[in-house]
Image: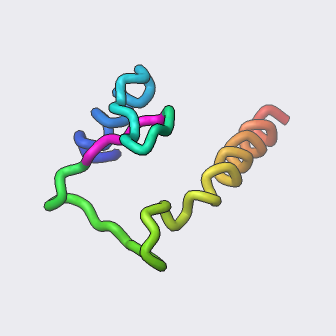
Amino acid sequence: MFPAEFIEGYKLFKAGKLEGDPRGTDYGWYLLTPGNVVKFNLNDSDIPVFLNAIPAIIDLDAAQALDRKK
């Protein structure tokens, strides 16, 4: 359901083959083709807007899986 560019980036992420951040973080980044993406920059920050929602989504998936088992 995702574009091929995202699928390739995810495969590299899962394999631990993304290039590290030049600022010294241990996780990597996958550059997307500028003509195919949109970036929302709020308050001059490059932090993804919905980053804080990711743990809640993971918890929701786990809760739904538990409900299915019941």
Name the side, left or right, on which 38 lies relative to 10.
Answer: left
The percent coordinates of residue 29 (x first, y second) are: 37, 41
> Residue at (63%, 59%) from the top-left corner?
53
Q: Residue furthest left?
A: 35
46 up-or-down from 70: above or below: below
The percent coordinates of residue 37 (x first, y second) are: 25, 61
Name the side, left or right, on which 68 lies relative to 37.
Answer: right
> Residue at (55%, 63%) from the top-left corner?
50
Q: Residue furthest top?
A: 15
Q: Quadrant of the C terminus?
A: top right
Query: Magenta stretch containing residue 30, yes or no?
Result: yes
Main SS of the magenta part reads loop
First to last magenta residue range: 27-31
- The answer to which of 34 and 68 lies nearer the viewer is 34
Q: Residue 13 sits in which quadrant? A: top left
Color theme of the render? rainbow
- The answer to which of 29 and 21 lies nearer the viewer is 21
Q: Residue furthest front?
A: 23
The percent coordinates of residue 4 (x first, y second) are: 23, 40
> Residue at (39%, 73%) from the top-left corner?
41
Q: Quadrant of the N terminus?
A: top left
Name the side, left or right, on which 2 lies relative to 36.
Answer: right
